[in-house]
Image (cartoon, rainbow, N blue to C red):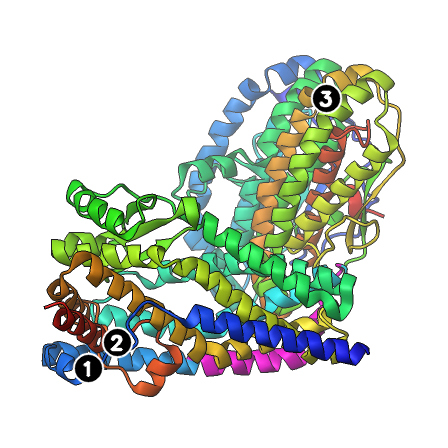
Amino acid sequence: VRRAGFIAAAAAVVAACIWGGIRLWDTTVPSDLELNTGAAMRSFDPEAEDEAADFEALIRWLFIASQLVLVGVLAVYARVGTRFMRESAAGPIGTGFLLGMMGIALVWLVQLPFGFVEIWWARRHDAAEVNYLDFVIGDIAGLAGEALFLCLLLLIVMGLARLLRAAWWAPGVAILAGLFTLLVWVSPFLLPGLEDPPRPIVADARPLAVKQGTTDAEVKIEDVHEWTEQPNAYATGLGETEQIVLWNTLTDGFDRREVRSVISHEFGHLQHDHLAKSIGWFALFAFPAALVVTVLTRRRGGLGEPAAVPLALLVVVVLQLVASPLVSGSSRRYEAEADWAALEATRDPAAMEALHHRFTAEALSDPDPPGWYHWMFDSHPSGAERVAMAREWAARNR
Amino acid sequence: VDHLSVAPEKPAQLVSPRPALAPNDQVRALNYDDLHRRRVTVFFRFFMALPHLLWLSIWSGGVLLLAPVLWIATLVNRRPPEGLREVYAMFVRYATHVYAFLFLAAQPFPGFLGRPGTCTVDLEVPPTGDQGRWGVGFRFFLALPPLLLATALVGFGGGGGGTSTSTGDESANLALNLGVGFTAAFFAWWACMARGRMPQGIRDLLVYAIGYAAQAYAYLFLLTSRYPNSDPAVAPLAPLPPHPVRLRLTDELRRSRWTVAFRLILSLPHLVWVTLWTVLIVLLAIAAWLVTLIAARPPRWMHRFFARYVRYQAHVVAFAYLGGGPFPGFVGAPGSYPVDIEIGERERHNRWTVLGRALLGLPAAAISSGVGTAMVIAAIGGWFFALITGRMPQGLRNLIAYGARYGAQVVAYYLFVTPRYPYSGPADFHR
């Protein structure tokens, strides 16, 4: 009966995941769009395209190599990491903290050379301003934040696992999803030093916000000149805390119409609740992942035992890699939806097209990355796809 | 001056006599002080020390000018020339006398030539011996870490001369230059004026600090090839008086290099937890103050809770500063850490001291803060050493353990865990 109950519960979870996945996968981008990326590619400056392709080729291989090293290090750590238990005078959860933090610290150490090479490469192509020392200091600060966050996760997971044994995952994932929601909600408050936008941006943003139903969202400017010249923007927050942030590398150097397209794209994310949907994806991923981790760490006494932590780290990272086509695929769909929303709101496909030409020329974004890599890891549609979409929108609205 | 420079009849040295020093042994601090102080000489202490400080500065200039000669001669002959060695020995001894006098660690006005036996806090310098040329060649760089620690311990540029260490950052420079010695001496002045007696704990802390600075300068000036030892166990200190908050040390000095490498990151969850705990403790301390003021002792549960906090923060300090090896637990359980704090039962408090506890604790808190600066330097030095060797130097570990114990006593005093005043003497390691 117990086995049947477990199978029924698992089947229910799988069915719920599939149903949720289908719902979340769906976007408002017309399904009959036919993107002529070949023609779009011809619109890019061949010299800029070559430079961007050259730049991103190394970045891609660095990423692949760093992922392989990451998995390798964690595999070794999963085998020998329990030796660090001797270095703990803490209880089981505290010892779990130690093992978890040592794991990510070792990962940080072996990833550091890749970071150095990436910075060197970006500086060589004038795509980054940051110096090596600032990079390391920033990286250590990031590691410190990760260490604390990991401790919080381990406190929840190990605490529940010690209390509920193998059944920890149901309340555990619910709590983690709640935590993730809270994090998305408070994230705008964690961004220091944001400035109000200049008047022309306010003037452009207001009618777009009205049109896209995002009038509650704030628009802010982030000064990033100190460490990069790359343009970027992002949407953050949830409900009342929603805001979009534009890097001043974008607002200072790009044409007003192009900036307007970006603003509208970011409003598009808010308009279609992409941040809320990312919480849904997190839960969808976390439920089966928690089940897999629970099953695989059983031989080490379950997640309530510190000895299971190094193995759990490995399993989570491997699962993340396995799921990356799905995760990056959904992300690309949401980016496309935000692009479509921006085209509908601005009705300015020329600006969108010009924007992506400049991204290739100035941010060295490869407009036509290798298909396998694009499918596995890219979170955004390629430049060619985005230009093709702008042209398709123009053709439909002629 | 001549009258004052004559050392009084010496009381017994504070550690049993030891065998004569062999060549290249550590310089040895001696302590014959009887704690008695004449208020009038205490009152004018800084004024009286002015000629010594002036003379010490002049002498410092001279020994710095001669230093290249000493260095080259020692590099060639493997030992300093006898005449120069004598000058440098007198200089380091004289600086020891001056700082002991200035900081109230010693009572008599010292002589101006650094002769042995002219001050109750004295220095024994080993006879000359052959030294390795590599050690002599790189002596200046090798001496930098102990000189930095000496500066943090003594202040005013350490006990061997009038120079100061510039870090480029004025506030850091000020904190370093004030040092434990200056802070302790400032509060000792008030105690001596009030009681005509030097508090034993502060005197011993000063003797330790000045003695360590003498070791550092003796090493720099090639009087010995022995690296300075920051272990309070080698200082001539009075036995540790009984105190309800005591250090219990079972650490074996071995360190895991990986946990040493990432020690700061690993300390983060503890630092966050101790901060959260501190917020609660501060709120409870107000309630504890009121209750203790009325009932003369805090409630039993509060005593237990505060004791756990005192123990836990000491564990965290020991771990973060590499005084302890393993990752500590989060609840301050007794006996759970190799650098542990034993805490006695609840005691009755004098209500007057409860009323003025915030003010009364200030001197100890300030001295503890100074010790904290020295602990940071010890931890940085220990970090490099432990990363390479997988072991923490005993001297640095003991300094950190002492700092953790003293800090725990200060916190315990503030939280009404004990009515006993924190004891600043680092005699925890004396048998």
Q: Is residue A31 left or right of residue A171?
A: left
On the rendered image, what quadrant is the C terminus of chain A found in?
A: bottom left
Which label lies toward us, 3 or 2? 2
Task: Check disc 2 and report the residue beneath it.
Answer: A382
- Do marks 3 and 1 share a chain? no
Residue type at the position of mark 2: Ser
Q: In the figure, residue B296 lies in which quadrant?
A: top right
Task: Check disc 3 and report the residue beneath it.
Answer: B357
Q: Chain of mark 3?
A: B
Residue A18 on image: x %, y %: 53, 76
Crowd class of label 1 (few under 14; some 14 to 19; many from 20; radius 10 Å) = many
* Element marked by disc 3: helix
Q: Chain of mark 1?
A: A
Q: Are marks 2 and 1 in contact (CB under 8 Å)?
A: yes
Extent of the magenta region: A66-90
Disc 3 versus disc 2: distance between alpha carbons? 68 Å
